[in-house]
Image (cartoon, grey):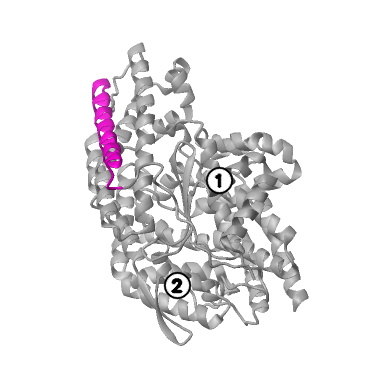
Amino acid sequence: MTDTTGTLPRWDMSVVYPGLDSPEFEQGMNANVASIDDLVNLFDRHGVERNEQAMLDEATIAAVEEVIERLNEVLQDSQTLGAYISAFISTDSRDDRAQAVMSQYQQHGATLQKLGTRFTAWVGSLDVDGLIERSEIAAEHRFALLQARRRAEHLMSPAEEDLAAELNLSAGSAWAKLYNNLSSQISVTVERDGEQVEMPMSQVRNLAHERDRNLRKAGYEAEMIAWERNALPLAAAMNGIKGQVSTLASRRGWDSPLDEACFDNHIDRATLDAMMTAARESFPDFRRYLRAKAHALGLDALTWYDLFAPLGDDPRVWSWDDAREFIVRHFHGYSERMGAFAERAFAENWIDAEPRPGKRDGAFCMPLRNDESRILANFKPSFSGISTLAHELGHGYHNINRCKVTVLQRTTPMALAETASIFCETIIRDAGLQEASDAEALAILEGSLQGSCQVVVDISSRFIFEQAVFERRNARELSIDELNTLMLDAQRETYGDGLDQEVLHPYMWAVKPHYYSAGRSFYNFPYMFGQLFALGLYAQYRADPDRFRASYDDLLMSTGLDDAATLANRFGINIQTPDFWRASFDIIRGDIERFEGLVMRDA
C-alpha cells in the first residue's frame, strides 16, 4: 500500500510579506489605505456620483478614463492584501492578530465599497453608449459599464447606500464572521475504537467517507449533537443575513433576492428556469443511482451517512506525491500550458492541504497577485481528494487566464467561475477511469456520480430551502425548528425515495457557509450551472480537441467580459432552453447506467 504518512504542504505566503507583524506588511497596509484615500479625493475632484445633468464632453471622458485606470489599480492592491490576511484566518481562525488585522482591513474595504457604489451611480448618469464609442478604455470595459448602468437602476440614494455599506460591518459582515469563527472552532466528541475522541468539525465530517458504517454513523450522530448545541447563534446569523438581504433588495427595486442573484451571475431567469427544469427531470435518474449504491453496500436504502461511503473492496490509497504526479501528468495531457501551471502551483507551495484544528473545512481557491493563486484543501488520500484538488487547481488556471485583463474586466460571476474547475476535474476523472482496475473504476465512477448528485440534487434542495427561507423571512424570523423543517422538506422533495426519509440532515443550513454571505445570496445554483456548462464544453473538447483548445483559454479570459448566454453562443450553445441542459444530463445518465451495470455485474 502507498505510504500516506508524509507531511502535507502548507501554502507559502512569505512571497508577499514576511508576516502580519512585519514592517513590510505594515508598509503595504498603510500604502493601501493611502491609495484608497487618494481614490476618494479623485472621486471628489471629478464629481463621481449620481449626476443627472452630466454631459459627455471631453473632460468627462478623460475623467472616466482616469477613474477606471486608478480604480483598477486600487482594487488589485486591495485584493492581494485581503487574500494575504484571509490566508491566516482560513487556516487558523484562532489567530487573534489576523482577526484584528482583518477587522481593520474591512473598515477600509467599506470605504472602497462605497466608492464602487458611487462609480456605479455615476456611470448610470452618463451616456454609456456614447462613452463606449468615444473612449478606447471605456470600450475595453464595455460590459462592466453596461452592467454598472443597469446596477445603477437598482441603487438607493447615495446617503442610503453609504449607510448600508457602513452598517454592513456590524450586520451582515459581522454575522458572517460569527458563523465562520464559530463553525471552524466547533469541537466534536466521537466514539472511535471504543474511545471518546475529540475532533474538529472538518475531521468529523470526513468520517462520512469511512468504510466502517458504524464509524460513519457515529460521526453523523456526533455531528448532529454538535450542530444542535451551536444552532442558536447560527440561526441568528441566518436570520440576520437573510433579513438584511431581503430588505436591501426590496429597497433597491429588485423583485426578489433571486432576481438580483441572476443579475450578479450574468444570467436571466429564462436560463435559470431552463436549467432547473432539466434538473427536476433528472431526479429519478439520481434516485436510481442512490438505490444502486445501496444495493452495492448491501443496504435496503441509503441513509444520509451513507451518501459518501466508498465502494469496492480494494480502492487505491493515494499519497500526496501520487496526487501531484497524476494531476501534473494529465494536465499536460490536455495542454503543455495547463501542465506547466500545475507544476508551478505545486513547486511554489500555492496549496495548503493539511487538515488541522482552527482551519476551515472544505476547499477553495483565491487569486493572490498577478497570476498567482492560493488553494486551501483538506486533503484525503483517495481519488475524491485528487478530484477536489484538480477542481481548485482549475480555478487557479482560470485565474491565470483572467490576469490578462483588468480587475473590472475580470469580475466573473459564480455561474461562470466554475467552468474551468469542473473542466479540470473532468479531465482527471476520465484519466482515472482509463487507468483504473475494475474495483478502482467502480470507486471513481461512484465518486463522480456522488459529486454530480451533490451538485444537482443536494444543491437543488439547498436552492429550494433558500427560496423558502426568503419567503418566510419577509414576515418574521425563523426558529431553529422551522429552519430544520424547511431543510428536511427540501431534501425529501429532491432525494425522494433514493434515501431513507427518516435519516436526513436537518442542519445542512448550518453546515454550508454559502448561506452566510450578505453579498452573495443563492450561492448554490451557480455550481450546478458550472458543472453542466463545463460538461457541455468537455463534450466539445472530446469531439474536436485541437479546435477546442484554440479558443478555450480565450473563453476563460472573457468570463467577465460578457453575459453567460453570449459566451455560450461562441460554442454554439443556447442555454436559455432546457435542451442544452438535458444534453448535459445525458452524459450523467450514461454514467449512471454504467454504474448500475458494474454494480449488478459484481452482485
Q: Dot 1: few (<14), some (14–19), or many (≥20) neighbours within 10 Å?
A: many
Residue depicted at x 29% and y 35%: 32
**Front residue (pair 330, 171):** 330
Residue 278 coordinates in the image, percent (x, y) = 61, 55
In the image, 455: left or right of 115? Answer: right
Residue 350 coordinates in the image, percent (x, y) = 48, 48
Q: Dot 2: few (<14), some (14–19), or many (≥20) neighbours within 10 Å?
A: many
Pointer 2 residue: 204
Tag 2: amino acid: Val
Tag 1: amino acid: Thr
Pointer 1 residue: 271
Residue 382 coordinates in the image, percent (x, y) = 59, 65
**Mark nearer the N terminus (2 vs 1):** 2
**Front residue (pair 143, 428):** 428
- Calculate the distance from the C-alpha at mark 2 to the C-alpha at mark 1: 38 Å
| Helix, strand or loop under label 1 | helix
- Does residue 502 appear in this view? no
Span shown in magenta: 20-47
Q: Please tell me the numbered disc located at residue 540.
A: none
